[in-house]
Amino acid sequence: MPGIAGITGKYIQVRREDKGVVTYGGDQGFFRSAEEASLDDRKRRMGCGIVALGDILLYLASRDALYCIKENRSYVNRILSQKEYAAYFNSIYDLVGGLPGGKGNGLSGIRLQRTFNRIARREGWKLHALWGISGKKLYGRMVEMLKGDIPVILCIPLLLFAKDPEQGISFYKKSGDQYQKSCTVSAHYVVVTEILEEKEDIFLGISSWGVKYYVNWKEYERLIHRAFLGTILGNILYIK
C-alpha cells in the first residue's frame, strides 16, 4: 500500500504491566484501576486529549532536542513503563490546567491550542498551533504536518442532537490486506501518524488507547459534514 505521508520515527512506546505488550502511543486506560468518581477516574474517562498532546510533544522531542522540555526530558527515545507514562501524563495534565469536573467530554480543541502555544512561547519555538474549523483544509493540513514529521491530533466529534449520540466513526484493524471493523467511537481524540492509499480508499493510521487503528477518511469526512458543528468539533490541531 503506497503511503501518502507519515512520521519518520518510532511512535511512543509503553510496556504494559499485565502482559508486557508494548503499546503504540499512550493510553489513559492506565488509570483504569482508579476508584469511581476519583480524579484518576476522570483522567481515565476524559484523558484522551492529554494523551494526544503529551504524545506529540514527546515525539517532537525524540526527533529534535530543541523540543525537549522539562516535563518530558527524562522520557525521550525509550520504552516507558506504565508508571513512568502515568507520571508524564500527570505533568501534561498540570500544564493543561486539569480536566473539567462532572461528566464533561474532556478538553476542547481551543484548550489544546492554547496549551501548545503557551509551551511554544515558553521554550522559544517557532511552531504555532491553531484549532482548525475548515473541513476543506483539514486533509491537506494533515498531509502537510505529517510530511513535516509532526503527528496530528484529530478529534472524532460527538454527534450533537443526534438520535444516537454514541454513534460515531468506525475504527479498523488491519489483517493482511483487509480492514476489519473493531469498534465505533465518538467524542474522542486520536493521533494520526500516517495516511495510506488503498485502491479507491484512503486510511488514516492512528494511535488510540495505545493501539494502532485505522480510520477510513471518506467515512470521517461524511461524519463531520453531516454533524452539527461537525467541522469545528471534528478537526485537527494544526501545527506549523
Image (tube, grey):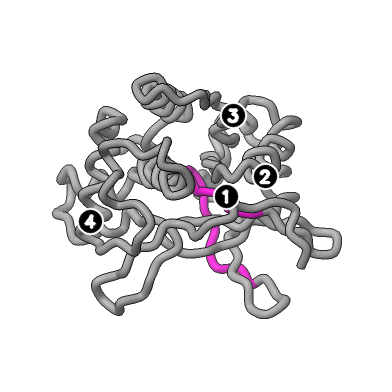
**CB atoms at circles 3 and 1 under 8 Å apart?**
no
The residue labelled by disc 2 is 147
Q: Is residue 183 magenta?
A: yes
Does 74 appear above or below 230?
Answer: below
**Cα distance in 3D space between marks 4 and 1:** 23 Å
- Give amino acid for label 4: Glu
The residue labelled by disc 1 is 192
**Cα distance in 3D space between marks 3 and 1:** 16 Å
Can you tell which mark lies on residue 21? none
Residue farthest toward the right in the current orientation of the protein: 200
For marks 4 and 3, the one nearer the N-term is 4
Q: Please state the total of marks drawn on the protein image.
A: 4
For marks 4 and 1, the one nearer the N-term is 4
The residue labelled by disc 4 is 84
Mark 3 neighbour class, 10 Å CA radius: few under 14, some 14 to 19, many 20 or more: few
For marks 3 and 2, the one nearer the N-term is 2
Magenta region: which residues? 180-194
Which type of secondary structure does the marked residue at label 3 adopt? loop
Q: Which quadrant holds the C terminus?
A: top right
- Give amino acid for label 3: Lys
Mark 1 neighbour class, 10 Å CA radius: few under 14, some 14 to 19, many 20 or more: many
For marks 4 and 2, the one nearer the N-term is 4
Can you tell which mark lies on residue 240? 3
Which type of secondary structure does the marked residue at label 4 adopt? helix
